[in-house]
Amino acid sequence: MSSSAVVQRYGSTGQVQSIDPYNDKGHVSIYRSAEFRREIQQREREAARAKRDRQQAARGAAKPAPRTVITVDTSRARSNIDVVRMCIRELRWREYAMGRRDLKCDVFWHGVNVQDYSSYYTGQINRFPGMGEILAKINLFRTLDLMKRIFPNEYDFYPKTWLLPHQYQEFCAEVTGNSSGKRKMKKTYIVKPSEGSQGDGIYLLKDPQEYCLHGNRSHVVQEYLSDPMLLEKFKFDLRIYVTLKSLDPLEFYIAKEGMVRFCTVAYQRPTYKNMQESYMHLTNYSLNKHSTTYNSSEREDEGSKRTLSSVLNKMASLGMDSSTLFEAIERLVSKTIVAITPELRVAYQAHIPAGKPGPSCFQILGFDILLMRDLKPMLLEVNSCPSLRTVCEQEVGPGVVTYLPCLKDEEIKRPIVRDTLLLVAPKEKLEVLKKERKERRKVRRRFRSRGSNVNRQSNGNCENASIDKDNEDTVVDENMKEPTQATSINVISEADNASESDRAKSVFDHVEKRPASTPIALFRYQDEDGEGDHTDADAEVALSSKPCARFDEDESDGGSYASDSENETEEESCLKQLYPAVYQAEYERLRIFEKVAHIFMSSLGIRGSWRIGLTGFRMFTRKCRLGRRKLTSAAIDILYIDFQKKWDYMNPDRTSGLCYQGFVDAFLEIARRKFYSVDMVEMLENLVDYCEANMVHNSHSAPYVNRRLLGRRGKNLPLRLSYDDSLLTDVDSMHISVSSTKNQRYKSTGVYGSTRTLYEPKE
Ligand code: ADP
């Protein structure tokens, strides 16, 4: 009888009928055998268990966390769950695997990019809004190209890139210009789908005609870097983990440990013959794991996946300068993050507008870097959701795959996640936890020292005991006469050791006879490493009075503080701060586009928008007083329409307005017309300064207010009102309501109905 839900009964015709006891509304009167009943009982038990679990989960979700406990919502952690859970246990924070009803957690961990931020009001989310789109290959390389236009010497760390099909003609022109006629000598290019990952849809080509356009899918095509650094004849790339902690102020960290992924077929320069060999040219783990030559060695300096430190050590042993290499990687990372920050800020304000209580964001990013033969690092892509899995797939048979824990992955990823969590956790709570831990240690140390004193005493007793026992002709080891603390513990804990059990028992018995407040309790306390059996009354009181008791500590959960260990040294963070600590002074000047982003955001008519409409664009030129020289109102309108057309290919949804990158393009054009200089940086800086000065001036000298908006009672008001430019931008669209209250405050209702003082007459 199968364990299906189908139950059979005899019908009136005497035939056996199949019924489902749960779907059938009538009673099942006749069961053919006891098996049916067993099955029903089994199902009822399962249903009851499921109900109990649900109730427990609901109770857990409603249970308020103590104030000092750091809480993490992992209900959407998906494939990250293993590593995040491991870290939460290690840190002894509290996990809410089903989320919390009141949505109040210190950290929300998502396995994929978040679409809707509207339901979050507090805490830290591990995803920045828009990060996925901003780091899509086509977007990333366009952003880097923009930076390269202004800072050509700084942004030379990625292969020459074209965006297809948009730049197909330029790509063809480049290839034709490069080809020396000889078929063999032709340069190789690599085509990658913009939204692709894990090597999906990638191919090499030498002729632009070989490019296949798949529907609407956009691609990037890059110069193929055919001269990479090889180790043991294999091509490899580096996965560097970076934690972007915040945008304002800009703060990011690089993980000192990373992953190195190797190809599984010895490398040769691309030829028409070997161009299709993905195991030779692509380093993706997801591809190479299927290769018959994939080496899954668990040693960190062996196999197709290795730790970054082992590879750097190997390079150092081969005479290469690995510290200079790591510095070059740090610089590459810093410049890339500086390049994407303006757009991230735009996306951030669109999802979490200023003034709206919203979560803060942080994110772990994965940089894929290829090393050239001369050790120059070249950026291939940045992953917004790098894999944080700590298991590896293993094919145990044809088409049968199992997942096994992968120590190398865990060794690399767990510290990154743990230290990132520590970085973003509320500082006050961390402080409290730190204090509690210190207190706990102190208490433990106190009892330990008391324990050792008592030890000595008890060892004295041991001696006596041995003497006594001697008198009773019992053989006692000489070592027992002056045992150290450790040996005394051993004696007790190794009581099951047959050869010593009698001696141990004699000691134990002797000590057991002592009053309850004396050492035996301390022995046990020590033996359990201070966490388990607190039989000593003082210890009990001392420990339970600590707030740490509120952790609901469950020793069986495997969690343990690294810092709770005997040698009390705080583990060094695996994250190194790059910005502001190391590169702020050097790269502050590269952040000029953040100012442009600010101008863009303050010109968006509607808060929460990504795109600027014609009205917003006109307002921007008016506020910045750009329409004076060389730029008439008509010219401004034409400029807007031209750039909207130019950037239309980036707007498949045909949303109206100009995106931020299109705005930057138009901004550069205005700079060229108004402040032309051969030095692009100077030209851009001049326009930015000019705009900022006018915006500040406008905010102080106040915009002109249309009297008609003020109603009858506003007729006597001065024509100029002052407002905070950074908060309220679209004067034309705000409604001004005037109330002649006693203290003569005039208030305006902004776009979101927030009331803000606009004008305060001086008494
Ligand atoms: P995906 O997101 O699909 O993994 P990547 O850009 O990371 O795409 O490329 C996949 C692999 O292709 C890289 O790991 C690298 O080995 C190889 N690759 C990508 N771009 C280049 C390039 N320009 N030159 C040489 N190899 C490249």
Image: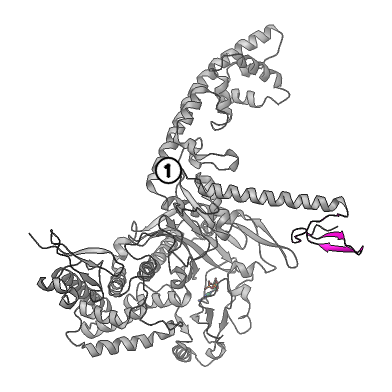
The kind of residue tagged 1 is Arg
Q: Residues within 10 Å of mark 1 (few under 14, many from 20)?
A: few
- Disc count in the image? 1
From the top left corner, tell me how far across and down residue 571 is, in percent. Answer: 47, 45
Residue at the image position 40 percent from the left and 40 percent from the top:
432
- Horizontal side of 329 relative to 47 (left or right) equals left
Name the residue furthest bottom.
181
Provide the residue designation for mark 1: 67
Identify the magenta region: 4-30
- Residue 336 versus residue 504 in the image, above or below: below
- Residue 69 versus residue 507 in the image, above or below: below
- Place residue 336 in its image quadrant: bottom left
- Horizontal side of 598 relative to 415 (left or right) equals left
From the top left corner, tell me how far across and down residue 272 is, in percent. Answer: 61, 85
Magenta residue check for 208: no
- Place residue 473 in its image quadrant: top right
Residue 326 visible: yes
Tell me the chief SS of the magenta region: loop
- Place residue 557 in its image quadrant: top right
Q: Which of the two residues, 463 or 226, is positioned nearer the viewer here?
A: 463
From the top left corner, tell me how far across and down residue 444 is, in percent. Answer: 48, 29
Q: Which of the two residues, 372 or 338, is positioned nearer the viewer here?
A: 338
